[in-house]
Image (cartoon, rainbow, N blue to C red):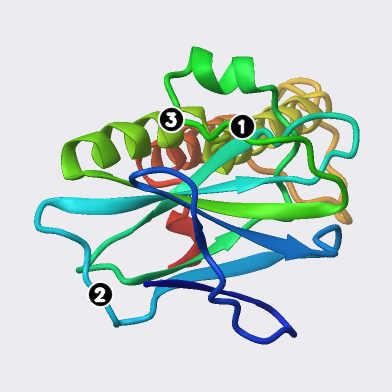
Amino acid sequence: MFAILVSGRLVQTEFQQVGEKQFLITIPEADDINHVAVFMTGTLPFPEGMSGLVYFSWPDPDAPPNWQPLGYISNTKPSAIFKISNLKTKSEKELERHGFIGFSQNKISHFAQIGISIETHDVVLQQIDLLDKHTPNAQPTFMEFSKKMLDSFLNFSSSFAVTQAQMVPNPTETYFPLSALQTWFQNFERRLEINPYFWRS
């Protein structure tokens, strides 16, 4: 029913059923894996109203597997590609504290595992919502950087400000009102808050 594809390797279909609704497959030499594709083979659909939560266990030779939720597959979304190179080992207690469904397996070493747990759509949506809430989002960091950069630019530019009375005409310099820079800064910041990627268009 399920298969995985790791870049540069043959398709693996040897999922083992380890519970009534839980399936596992082992990935050897998993240390250098960046992405994994998980998909349904088309031989069997999910039962009506059910989907599959996909988990990844990063190899840790000194501890049992720590299951990290990746996402899901379903009859309407029969495949998904997951980036796993940025995952870090988390304790099972941390995942349980956040309410993630987990697997309980024996100690493994130098191998990763993909787990699929067949659950109702409601449970899947709850788990995906938890995953989204606890997945780091690059957007706040990007916005924070942009605002810090703008603040720095405004402060730097302001340090060169002189009043009309202090200004000595210099034919090699171009002057503009500081208020124009402040207006630009406010407009840019406002547009950034509305759409962090407005500058792409």
Decide: is 29 above or below 117. Answer: below
Q: Is residue 30 left or right of residue 192?
A: right
Q: How many marks?
A: 3
Q: Is residue 50 left or right of residue 110?
A: left
Q: Secondary structure at mark 1?
A: helix
Q: Secondary structure at mark 2?
A: loop
Q: Nearer the viewer, residue 185 or 162?
A: 185
Q: Is residue 196 left or right of residue 165?
A: left
| Image location of residue 175, percent across then percent down | 72, 44
Residue at coordinates 9% horizontally, 57% vertically from top-left? 48
The disc at residue 147 is 1
Q: Nearer the viewer, residue 180 or 200?
A: 200
Q: Earlier in the sequence, mark 2 or mark 1?
A: 2
| Image location of residue 89, percent across then percent down | 75, 34
The amino acid at mark 2 is Leu
Can residue 177 be seen at all in this image of the molecule?
Answer: no
Judging by the rendered image, the residue that carries numbered circle 2 is 44
Marks 1/3: CA distance?
Answer: 38 Å
Marks 2/1: CA distance?
Answer: 51 Å
Q: Give the image quarter of residue 198.
A: bottom left
The disc at residue 101 is 3
| Image location of residue 68, percent across then percent down | 58, 38
Q: Nearer the viewer, mark 1 or mark 3?
A: 3
Decide: is 174 above or below 119. Answer: below
Characterize the local packing of mark 2: few (<14), some (14-19) or many (20 or more) Cα atoms within 10 angstroms. few
In the rendered view of the protein, which quadrant contains the N terminus? Answer: bottom left
Residue at coordinates 75% horizontally, 29% vertically from top-left? 152
Marks 3/2: CA distance?
Answer: 24 Å
Q: Earlier in the sequence, mark 1 or mark 3?
A: 3
In the rendered view of the protein, which quadrant contains the C terminus? Answer: bottom left
Q: Earlier in the sequence, mark 3 or mark 2?
A: 2
Q: Are marks 1 and 3 in contact (CB under 8 Å)?
A: no
